[in-house]
Image (tube, rainbow, N blue to C red):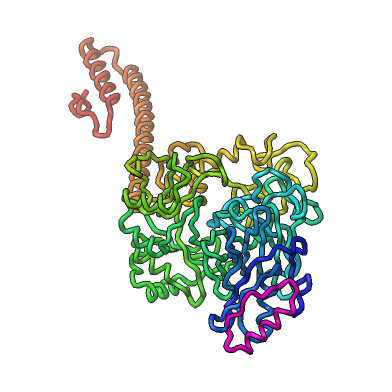
Amino acid sequence: MKMNSAESCQFDTTNSHNTSNVEFDVNLSCKNCASSVEKALSNIPDVKIISIDVEKQSVVVESSLPSQVVKEAIESTGKRAVLKGFGSKKLESAVAEIKGEGGIFGVIRFHQVDKDLCVIDGTVDGLSSGEHGLHIHEYGDLSQGCESIGPHFNPTDSVHGGREDLKRHYGDLGNIVADSQARASFRIHDNIVKVYDIIGRSLAVTADRDDLGKGSSKLICFPCCFLPKIKTHSDFTIVNSDYAISLNYSQQVSMDTTFNNMFYKSAKTLKELVMRLGSQTYDEINIIIANAEKPKKLPQSNPFLIQDFVKKSVSRHEQIENMKYTRQGKFQFTTKDPICAVQLLSLEKFMDISVATDIIWENVSARFLIFDIPTSTPLKELAAEIEDKNDCIVVEMRRFLKQNSPKEMSPVLITILGTTVPEAIKIWFVHQRLQKFIDRPRQCNKCFSFMHPSCICDKTIICYLCGAAHIGPCQQPVKCINCNGPHNAKSTSCPSYITEQKILELKCRNHITTGEARRIFQQNKATYSETVKTMPAVTNIEDTINAKFETLLQAINDRFERQMAIFADMLQKSMDCICQNFCKIITQCVDPGSSPVRKKKLFSNLRQMSNSINSWDAGGSQEAEDMPQC
């Protein structure tokens, strides 16, 4: 069989003497089948047949070509070949599974031929025709996709380049080429990559061509080495066998629960963890139901139709406390019943639409740091020790330590089920004090906004120094794109950065989402210290309404009393004026010939009447009623 053209198969011709053993399972039924396979393989240069065993249905060859080329040669005889192993018995091997949107899937194997050479062999299906960048990234955390895998692995702090450049990132593996059938097969010989250095890291394939640091394409690498439109990513795992274990495309074995000494994820399923919430402390469980086809949104249907559907699909529907349609086109259901939450998570269709379900972890989990943990302790063993000695369930663990660091101790970030963080936990007869973990603000690497991750940003890449879009070194004045201050967009003294820190602190203390924390913070900017202590949701709406109504009535009553006091004062002044004028008139009308005793008695009665009017109130004056008649 002839080798595919450069469009469909890409591999190095240098170091072609460095071969690897490749083993296939082939459905051989007789000696004639074995002869056909042997003839097909003999026609391919650089392929040495080691064994063809009809009884074991096995074919083992030694070759410097991509394993996909050998596989296609075997299948040209009409037999089905499944890659079983790749590597040798001398040094370590590793394998990474690539998965992405739109049916992208592939397997890439790393085999350490000797201490100075690593053979990288792989095939990726589902890519668009043309070149695509291939890079090793610093972290193996796939929880947030492109946001959590970090920049290119670059321990020597070198510049971005190609695989043949003398100066390049450790993780720069150049471009791979996909043919018109959306397949990229390649075999790369690299003298920088070491298998023991990449265990626990991640592998990424970009949607477009990598410019290799030459600036020949629009994918300009900024100091953070961010390549936009990363579509696929994977993590590595060490393979404890003679050959690197094979992950065939038809098998698509998941590697999401890979354990290593930097990151640990509980082997319990999501539904099992939710069921265990019954023994933990939490306020509510929020279930998100989204369209299984990620770009599409769920339609906003009639609430009565949704209610009928949920009643038929969820037996404990009466435990649902709230339902809302989010701006992202998803439905969010709130409940306090773990069984009801599991039933919602089990939905595969929602109103005849295929859906994917998930849980908002911020509402049901807590994170904290423990310090001085030996780096030699596997995180899996540490999780088992914590669960055995303490009343908690570990969901996830992450070690804060650079690869190949000489430090013997390191802090570990632990995520547990439930929102109550203990003051201390017991490990190895030691009471470890805890520290609450508040994440640092994260920015988009394209527009440097705090509001969204880079993977969903559709804006033009800008310079973090001046905030403008340009190519080459920045020659403009430094200006922050977020606050317009005289500093760059990554400055930790930026007011926007400080505000985001406070929002994340609010999120951590109240176990709410970032969006909810941002909304509460914006409503209470002036009293941040009180905002942190405020619960995000009102637990009893009836009591709240009654309290507000009583406050309103009290305000109305106070205003009425003030108005009545003003009216009484005005009335008293008017009566004083009337009485004074009345006294003057009577004085002028008194007969001059009256006796002095009669005049004295008259003036005494007038003064008594005036005093009675001055003491007027709502009930009248008793003195005025008892006043003698003139």
Asked if residue 446 can be seen in this view, the reply is: no
Considering only vertical position in the picture, is 187 above or below 466? below
Q: Residue furthest top?
A: 596
Q: Which quadrant of the rendered structure holds the N terminus?
A: bottom right
In the displayed structure image, the side of residue 245 where residue 71 appears, left or right: right
In the displayed structure image, the side of residue 453 where residue 529 appears, left or right: left
Magenta region, residue range: 27-53
Q: Report the front residue among 386 and 448.
A: 386
Q: Position of residue 367 (x, y in %)?
A: 43, 47
Q: How many marks?
A: 0
In the displayed structure image, the side of residue 520 where residue 424 appears, left or right: left
Q: Report the front residue among 397 and 418.
A: 397
Asked if residue 290 can be seen in this view, the reply is: yes
Q: Position of residue 46 (x, y in %)?
A: 73, 71
Q: Is residue 513 magenta?
A: no
Q: Report the front residue among 91 and 414.
A: 91
Residue displayed at 73% across by 69% down: 178
